[in-house]
Image (spheres, rainbow, N blue to C red):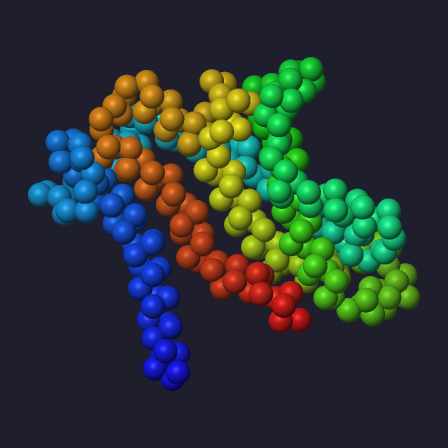
Amino acid sequence: MNRFARLQPVAAVATALVLLGIPFWLVLVTAAKDQAQALNPTLALPERWQLLENLQAVFTDGRMLAALGGSLLVMVPSVLGVLILGSMASWILARRSSRWLAAVYALAISGIVLPPAVVTIVLLLRQLGLAGTATGMVGVYMGMYLSTVIFFVTGFVRTIPLELEEAARVDGASPWRVFARIILPLLRPVLATATILICLYIWNDVFYALFVIGGRIDTLPLNLYQVASSGLYLQNWHLVFAYIILMSLPLLLTFVVAQRRIISGITSGAVK
């Protein structure tokens, strides 16, 4: 039994290296090859490393700077919107108990398991005059991921002692002041976790962006799809994989820097 317990961490690390390390290595070595070697992507090392040249070619010819601006244009307002509205709604749902609010909470988190109807969304945006606009895309993302924030934050708010809010109200604090000064600072760990998850979803989204803003605003996944399908990167797997590395680099660096806060946000509700 002791030997089995000692082998468990080793097995877990080995499994993670196989499941995560092999795909990452495939992307890295393919992005460092020339077109002929990358025609059939393998795990073999390139004869000559030209990763920097491929990254530079992708950044210059793939119009990544404009696509980066488009991604930030729809991601930043979407994330800020769902965090603010979701945390305020979660505070109300966690502090008040009634059958009506229980039904509202069940409806609010149902978006986690119920996929949005793309055709209905596109038709509604056309009726509102928001089809093909950044505002429409922000509205779609907020509607999709508000459930995630409410699900994360509501359980966390219930672990915060109610006496903190009562003491602030006794001192004459308004509900908004209680939320801004007491509740919101305590939500930082769980909001950091929700931020990373939602940024990851939006940053890599191509399906909904293609239907809502495709052809009008470029995001990084949309730009990669367009340049690859138009023939610019046809059979150029080294450029495609180099584009993927550049596209993933911002979120990867963010995760490495904020990993402790992310993990603490996931586990804080259970610890408390």
Q: For residue 49, which quarter of the picture?
A: top left
Is residue 266 found left or right of 253 in the rendered image? right
Is residue 183 found left or right of 228 in the rendered image? right
Is residue 238 found left or right of 119 in the rendered image? left
Q: Residue at x 61, y 58 (%)?
A: 190
**Farthest residue in the left direction?**
47
Q: Quadrant of the N terminus?
A: bottom left
Residue 261 place in picture, x, y as percent:
53, 62
Number of callouts: 0
Q: Is residue 98 above or below residue 8?
A: above
Residue 127 place in picture, x, y as percent:
69, 15
> Viewer-proximal residue, 71 or 149?
149
Q: Is residue 70 visible?
A: no
Q: Is residue 229 visible?
A: yes
Residue 51 place in picture, x, y as percent:
21, 41
Q: Quadrant of the C terminus?
A: bottom right
Q: For residue 18, which quarter of the picture?
A: bottom left
> Viewer-proximal residue, 54 or 69?
54
Q: Residue at x 44, y 58 (%)?
A: 257
Q: Residue at x 62, y 43 (%)?
A: 112
Residue 149 place in picture, x, y as percent:
65, 48
Q: For residue 97, which quarter of the picture?
A: bottom right
Q: Residue at x 34, y 68 (%)?
A: 11
**Farthest residue in the bottom direction?**
2
> Viewer-proximal residue, 18 or 36?
18
Q: Is residue 145 above or below residue 139?
A: below
**Farthest residue in the front direction?**
1
